[in-house]
């Protein structure tokens, strides 16, 4: 009887393969392949309006999808289910926002200025899009109990729209020379590793930490992440951006701690 590979194992293998591609290219002196921009976007004008529109579509899908997950849990008439769905959604969102400071740190630390006028070593777009695509898939695959009927169809539709908008936006990212292939691969690796980090916090059978430890780890990662971003000068300097960042974290942490029910979705 053939054994099926677990979801988390498949993700880990994918990360190892992507990492191997980067280092194998360096070993065989194929750096030119990895360190090439498709075009010089500073010599060819690229209209950013389409990219902005696609990102707004993705943000709308994320908001709609997660709102539907929380709303669907209320139909079960069980407060614990409602609490657990909020816990999961907040954990996914905080992990993204909290770790973004670390991504900014790596952009500077790796000091790769190809395709940019400043250090831009990791593609934040590829990390963002793969992270939420995997999160959508994970929730749809595991929360079958209360994503039923029309809600399931809407959630699936939002997921498909998100994937289509993401593919179009990532295509623009490569074609219009925003990132090299190595920066794209690093972005994919970062997004997948972040997703593994999330589902390892008690959402899988192989959990090795408690709910309380998971919250402490997430808090520690958030603080250290943005401290590193501040260290390399990538902390938001504009008051409006700083306010929005802090407001999002405070609100999400408030919901997380108020609904700290570990959700087991395996």
Image (tube, rainbow, N blue to C red):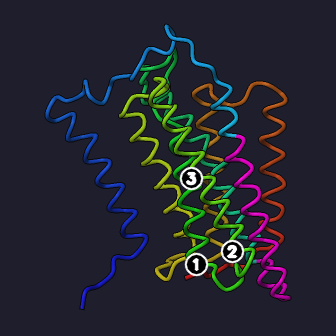
Q: Position of residue 60 (x, y in %)?
A: 75, 50
Q: Secondary structure at mark 1?
A: helix
Using the numbered discs, state the Cα–Cα distance from disc 1 to disc 2 in whole angstroms. 12 Å
Using the numbered discs, state the Cα–Cα distance from disc 2 to disc 3 in whole angstroms. 16 Å
Q: Which residue is mark 2?
A: 152
Q: Residue at x 56, y 52 (%)?
A: 163
Mark 3 or 1, nearer chain start = 1
Q: Residue at x 56, y 41 (%)?
A: 102
Q: Position of residue 69 (x, y in %)?
A: 74, 70
Q: Residue at x 84, y 37 (%)?
A: 243
Dot label at residue 142: 1
Provide the residue span drawn in magenta.
56-83
Dominant secondary structure (helix, strand or loop) of the stretch shown in magenta: helix
Foreground residue among 263 and 184: 184
* Residue 260 part of the magenta segment: no
Using the numbered discs, state the Cα–Cα distance from disc 3 to disc 1 in whole angstroms. 19 Å
The reply to whether callout 1 and callout 2 are in contact (CB within 8 Å) is: no
Pointer 2 local density, CA inside 10 Å: few below 14, some 14–19, many at least 20: some
Foreground residue among 198 and 156: 156
Mark 1 or 2, nearer chain start = 1
Name the image quarter holding residue 71.
bottom right
Q: Which residue is mark 3?
A: 163
Depth-wise, is mark 3 or mark 1 nearer the camera?
3
Pointer 3 local density, CA inside 10 Å: few below 14, some 14–19, many at least 20: some
Q: Position of residue 19 (x, y in %)?
A: 31, 47
């Amino acid at each position: 009887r053939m054994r099926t590979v677990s979801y988390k194992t498949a993700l880990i293998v994918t990360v190892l393969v992507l990492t191997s591609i980067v280092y194998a290219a360096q070993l065989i002196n194929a750096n030119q392949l990895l360190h090439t921009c498709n075009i010089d976007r500073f010599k060819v004008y690229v209209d950013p309006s389409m990219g902005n529109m696609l990102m707004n579509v993705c943000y709308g899908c994320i908001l709609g999808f997660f709102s539907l997950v929380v709303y669907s849990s209320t139909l079960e008439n069980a407060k614990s289910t409602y609490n657990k769905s909020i816990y999961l959604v907040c954990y996914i969102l905080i992990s993204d926002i909290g770790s973004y400071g670390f991504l900014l740190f790596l952009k500077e630390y790796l000091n790769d200025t190809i395709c940019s006028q400043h250090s831009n070593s990791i593609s934040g777009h590829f990390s963002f899009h793969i992270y939420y695509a995997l999160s959508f898939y994970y929730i749809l695959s595991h929360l079958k109990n209360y994503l039923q009927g029309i809600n399931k169809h809407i959630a699936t539709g939002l997921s498909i729209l998100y994937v289509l908008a993401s593919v179009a936006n990532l295509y623009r990212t490569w074609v219009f020379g925003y990132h090299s292939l190595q920066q794209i691969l690093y972005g994919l690796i970062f997004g997948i590793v972040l997703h593994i980090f999330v589902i390892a916090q008690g959402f899988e059978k192989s959990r090795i930490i408690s709910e309380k430890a998971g919250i402490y780890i997430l808090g520690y990662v958030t603080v250290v992440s943005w401290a590193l971003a501040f260290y390399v000068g990538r902390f938001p300097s504009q008051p409006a951006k700083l306010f929005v960042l802090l407001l999002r974290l405070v609100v999400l942490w408030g919901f997380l701690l108020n609904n700290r029910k570990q959700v087991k979705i395996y």
